[in-house]
Structure formats: structure tokens, C-alpha cells
Image (cartoon, rainbow, N blue to C red):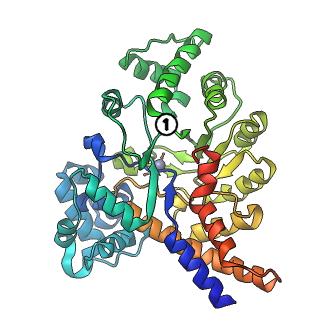
């Protein structure tokens, strides 16, 4: 029995075509926002932070280098001079191998020759196939000038890419939001009164119509609270939650990020902190008709989130985000979720910033699923349940795609 369980789980996990519910990828048609290739892979901000630790140079020195030299310097610190043992560094080895490159032998030039850095539908297709990914959800910012231009030119988006409307600036400082809205021709007053909120709602409604997102989302610092007297709560109550209800859109909450604790590191300068999940409790309990996808960044918040999800069926924990996307923590978090929720969560998302990330992030997620599911199904069989291949396949599909698709109403 044990060996059939292991074979059935492995086969189901190998075969499943993933829906990746949170990435930072764009289709080739978004030209300048597309990221791929060896230099893109090596200048991932996870690796930049690690290389600067290891290499003894300042962030200013590093960022003054042209991108090609940045990549070579990262390679030198994390691969040539030592063993690439970290999660992100080992990811590069896995990408190289998937493209037939032996990184130790072929070095950075081997990787550069095998990976392609120009936007290309054929190359994207090849990477999707290698990673076993069916569709990816982007992170779409309606206030980003470059991204807006692509949406405004109205060309259809490749069907493998689904949109998610990202709302971070709408839940931060009102003064800063005013400026950003003014830059795109929308004027609101400093009062944040009901006319202003109606204007914000109209703006977002226009972008929902244009992007057709599968959910709305925002990331928040550990201090995120709800409800409060601050404008962020009013924006939630007057604009975002009504839009979720009206359009049947889930709201993704990504809580626990301390932005720019070290601004010198730029994109690599964010950290994490313990959150107050009372905000999630209140949102879920006062909006039973809205579905919330929730992920938390600190390890300490994972158990509380799972317990809350037991109380509110409209709460769907998703993925192991960023600093908890490591071998050790994904095992712990995913087993905990299975033990308290059964297979009613989204196992993983990639957070890929560079196309080829899909390859190693989903390879790791598949290994995670095999470990956790073989263990649980073996226990289940020992407990007296005659496990079948069919039920394993259904559960694997739920964890890698169907739970998300059903909650997003995208099936
Ligand atoms: O979506 C987010 O807020 C984060 O995932 C990103 O800001 C972060 O930089 C990302 O690369 C982490 O994996
Ligand atoms: Zn992200």
C-alpha cells in the first residue's frame, strides 16, 4: 500500500497543471515589463541581498554596476566562491539543469546561452511547459505609468495570463494617493469625503472593466488594522468591499511586510513582522459574502491564520509567501494546514518575478506536495481508510488549481 500511495502521489503531482495565483510576471506583449534570461534570474532581489551579505560591498557600489556586471558579481559571490546552498541560489541550479546547463561546468556564460532574455511567446510557452504551469496570475497596478500604457492600448492579453488588480497605494497614505491619482488625471480632495471615495470607486471600477481581474489584492504591514478611523478603512468600506460584492471578486490580503527597512537595498530591502490577525477576523466576519484569500509573511502568524480559516469558510489561506517559501517552512505550514483544514487551501504560489522562476518554484512546490501528501495518505491508510488513486488525484488538483479557480469563480 505504502509504495502504491507514493507512486500515485508522485504521478498525480507530476502531472497536475498548475494555476499560479500570485506572480509578478507579464506576457511578452507587455514588452518592457517582461523579465527573463540569465541576468534577470541572477539579479533576483532575493539573490542581491544574499550576494551583498557575502561579498562585502555596499548596495550603492552594487547598484552602480550595469545589469550584466551585477549578474556576474552575484554569480561570483554565490556560485563561484561558495556552494549555492540557499533556497534562491539552489533555484538557479535547478533552472540551469532544466535547460540542460551544468552550472558548475558551464558557468554564467552557459546559463546566458541557454536562457532567452527577449520577450517571446514561443519561449514563454517552453517555460510554461517545463514548469507544468497552465496559467499565471499577474500583479497589476493601475497607477503604474508603464503598465497603464499597455492596458490602455487595448491589445488582448495572452490567455495564459490572468489579471489581479493590486491596491496597495489605495490603502496607504491618502496624501500620497491623491498625488498618484492626480498624475493620471483623477482629482480628489484632501478631505477623503464621500464624493472623493465615490471618485476612487469609479476609478477602480473602470480598471476592473479594463483588466477583468480574477481578484483584488493588497499587501499590508504587520500593523494593518481594521476597522479604524483612518482613511484606509473608509476606502475598504466605501470602495473595495462594495466592488468585491458587486463583481463577485475575492480580496487577497498579504499581511506582514515591513517595506524598506533597508532602503539602500532597494527592492531587496523589505522585511517581515508579526501581524495582528484581528483585522482578518473582522473583515471575514463582517463580510460573509466576500471571499478572502489570505497569506501571512511571518512564521509566527501561520497557526492563528489556519485557526481563523476554520471559523470562517470565506477565508482561504494561500501559499507560503516570500520569506516562508523555504523547504523547512513550507513543509511545516502545509502540514499544519492539512491537519486543521483538510485540502481546502491553495498549496502554493510562485511569486515569480522572472519567467524562469516558474521552473524551480514549482519544482519545489511539487516536492513539498509529495512529502506532505505521501506522509498523510500513508497515515490515513494505516488508520483504516482504503486510499485510491482517484481520490489522490482529486486532492492534488484541488491544492494546485481547483480550490483557487472555484473561489475565484474562474471555472
Ligand atoms: O507581492 C508582494 O508584495 C511581494 O511578493 C513582493 O513585493 C516581493 O518583492 C516579492 O518579490 C516576493 O517574493
Ligand atoms: Zn508578490
The picture quadrant where one finds residue 56 is bottom left
Q: Is residue 77 visible?
A: yes
| In this rendering, position of residue 36 left or right of residue 8 | left
Q: Between 42 and 261, which is closer to the camera in this rendering?
A: 42
Q: Quadrant of the N terminus?
A: bottom right
The picture quadrant where one finds residue 156 is top left
Q: Is residue 88 visible?
A: no
At numbered mark 1, what does the secondary structure look like: helix, strand or loop?
A: strand
Toward the right, the furthest residue is: 384
| In this rendering, position of residue 292 left or right of residue 84 | right
Q: Residue at x 19, y 65 (%)?
A: 112
Count neighbours of disc 1 (C-alpha within 10 A) and say few if under 14, some if 14 to 19, many if 20 or more: many
Q: Residue at x 43, y 20 (%)?
A: 181
Q: Is mark 1 within 8 Å of ligand 1?
A: yes
Residue identified by numbered label 1: 166
Q: Return the x and y of residue 119 as percentages of the image width and height.
A: 24, 50
* Total numbered badges shown on the rendered structure: 1
| In this rendering, position of residue 69 left or right of residue 201 | left
- In the image, residue 189 sits, relative to residue 393, either above or below, namely above
Q: Residue at x 58, y 67 (%)?
A: 330
Q: Return the x and y of residue 68 as percentages of the image width and height.
A: 17, 57
The picture quadrant where one finds residue 359 is bottom left
Q: Return the x and y of residue 93 as percentages of the image width and height.
A: 33, 74
Q: Return the x and y of residue 328 as percentages of the image width and height.
A: 56, 72
| In this rendering, position of residue 33 left or right of residue 247 | left
Amino acid at each position: 500500500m505504502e509504495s502504491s500511495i507514493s507512486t500515485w502521489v508522485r504521478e498525480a503531482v507530476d502531472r497536475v497543471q498548475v494555476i499560479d495565483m500570485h506572480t509578478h510576471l507579464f506576457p511578452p506583449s507587455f514588452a518592457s515589463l517582461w523579465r527573463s534570461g540569465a541576468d534577470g534570474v541572477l539579479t533576483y532581489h532575493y539573490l542581491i541581498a544574499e550576494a551583498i551579505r557575502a561579498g562585502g560591498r555596499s548596495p550603492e557600489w552594487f547598484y552602480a554596476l550595469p545589469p550584466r556586471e551585477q549578474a556576474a558579481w552575484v554569480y561570483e559571490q554565490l556560485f563561484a566562491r561558495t556552494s549555492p546552498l540557499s533556497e534562491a541560489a539552489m533555484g538557479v541550479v535547478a533552472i540551469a539543469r532544466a535547460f540542460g546547463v551544468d552550472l558548475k561546468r558551464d558557468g554564467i556564460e552557459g546559463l546566458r546561452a541557454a536562457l532567452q532574455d527577449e520577450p517571446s511567446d514561443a519561449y514563454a510557452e517552453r517555460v510554461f511547459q517545463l514548469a507544468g504551469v497552465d496559467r499565471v496570475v499577474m500583479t497589476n497596478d493601475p497607477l503604474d505609468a508603464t503598465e497603464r500604457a499597455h492596458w490602455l492600448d487595448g491589445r488582448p492579453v495572452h490567455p495564459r495570463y490572468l489579471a489581479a488588480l493590486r491596491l496597495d497605494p489605495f490603502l496607504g497614505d491618502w496624501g500620497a494617493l491623491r498625488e498618484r491619482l492626480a498624475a493620471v488625471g483623477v482629482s480628489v480632495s484632501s478631505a477623503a469625503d464621500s464624493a472623493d471615495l465615490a471618485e476612487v470607486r469609479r476609478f477602480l471600477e473602470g480598471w476592473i472593466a479594463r483588466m477583468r481581474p480574477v481578484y483584488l489584492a493588497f499587501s499590508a504591514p504587520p500593523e494593518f488594522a481594521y476597522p479604524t478611523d483612518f482613511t484606509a478603512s473608509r476606502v475598504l468600506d466605501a470602495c473595495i468591499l462594495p466592488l468585491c460584492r458587486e463583481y463577485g471578486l475575492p480580496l487577497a490580503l498579504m499581511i506582514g511586510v515591513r517595506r524598506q527597512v533597508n532602503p539602500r537595498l532597494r527592492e531587496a530591502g523589505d522585511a517581515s513582522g508579526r501581524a495582528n490577525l484581528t483585522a482578518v477576523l473582522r473583515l471575514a466576519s463582517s463580510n460573509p459574502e466576500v471571499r478572502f484569500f489570505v497569506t501571512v509573511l511571518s512564521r509566527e502568524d501561520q497557526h492563528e491564520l489556519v485557526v481563523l480559516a476554520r471559523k470562517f469558510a470565506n477565508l482561504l489561506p494561500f501559499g507560503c509567501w516570500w520569506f516562508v517559501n523555504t523547504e523547512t517552512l513550507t513543509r511545516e505550514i502545509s502540514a499544519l494546514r492539512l491537519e486543521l483544514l483538510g485540502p481546502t487551501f491553495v498549496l502554493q504560489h510562485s511569486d515569480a518575478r522572472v519567467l524562469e522562476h516558474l521552473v524551480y518554484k514549482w519544482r519545489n512546490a511539487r516536492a513539498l506536495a509529495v512529502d506532505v501528501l505521501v506522509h498523510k495518505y500513508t497515515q490515513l491508510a494505516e488508520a483504516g481508510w482504503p486510499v485510491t488513486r482517484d481520490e489522490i488525484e482529486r486532492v492534488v488538483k484541488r491544492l494546485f488549481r481547483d480550490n483557487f479557480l472555484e473561489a475565484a469563480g474562474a471555472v
